[in-house]
Amino acid sequence: MTGSSASEAFEAIAPYYDLLMQSIPYLWWMHYVETLLEHFDRSAHKVLDLCCGTGNLSELFALSGYEVVGVDKSPAMIEQARRKAEASRSGVRYYVQDAAELALNETFDLIVSLFDSLNYITEPSRFAEAMRRAYQHLTSTGLFIFDLNTEYAFVHKLFDQSQLEPKAPLRYRWRSRYDKSTRLCTVEMEFWVREGNTERYFTEIHRQRAYSEAEVRQMLYAAGFAEVHTFDAYTLDPPTRRSDRVFYVALR
């Protein structure tokens, strides 16, 4: 077995990320976003996938006829996304950028940031700046759609997961710790990847912050958004105190 020391989020895992996420219903996610667009009687042609990872959602949007740009702060993830775009000839443009430092000099009809990506912005001031940057990159009728893990998810340890089947090509074990005073959730992730006759072991440390709905609303309004709506994940129902993931739709 080969090993490596702990790395920051989305660096060591980048070459294996699609293997880790192979059961994720990206197409369903895209259809849900389109349902939200229809619900608010808005249309979109040009889409920014904020915190796009390896570009799985970006590629689906492009395949469906949208003009797509993807950004992510992880160079390793963007490298994988660019390889994907080159192979598929999707035309998606990918850039290494932090959401709180977004600067593309172009605007979009729709900005999406899914799978609790923005929880990784653990400093409230930078989270607020990410909201401002998103607003600045939208057209006058644009929407910003994103989801966040709630404090309920962290308290109830919904990050604690494992896949330790001996024959699985990628095995993992995740253990989380949530600090209510700082509202930070630290997740220690262990991975085992089979590479030929050897198995590589590595770890990553992920940190997310719990933001209350009131905080997020205030930041969005301060950024300039005219309307903010929230939904229990993947529905058109309002969130409840037991919602572990909440979708936000901010309209200019």
Image (cartoon, rainbow, N blue to C red):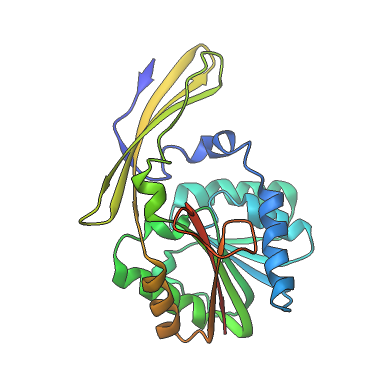
Q: Which residue does the image show at 49% across and 59% down from the upper left?
A: 240
Percent position of residue 184, x then y? 28, 53
**Which residue sits furthest top?**
197
- Image vertical order of residue 17 relative to residue 116, above or below: above
Tell me the quarter of the image containing the N terminus: top left
Percent position of residue 203, x then y? 35, 32
- Image vertical order of residue 143 relative to residue 87, above or below: below
- Image vertical order of residue 236 relative to residue 116, above or below: below
Image quadrant where residue 63 sits: bottom right
Q: Left or right? Give the position of 72 relative to 156.
A: right
Image quadrant where residue 229 sits: bottom right
Percent position of residue 51, x then y? 50, 59
Numbered circles on residues, count: 0
Percent position of residue 218, x then y? 39, 79
Q: Which residue does the image show at 68% across and 68% down from the upper left?
A: 36
Q: Left or right? Give the position of 168 relative to 172.
A: right
**Which residue sits furthest front?**
241
Tell me the quarter of the image containing the C terminus: bottom right
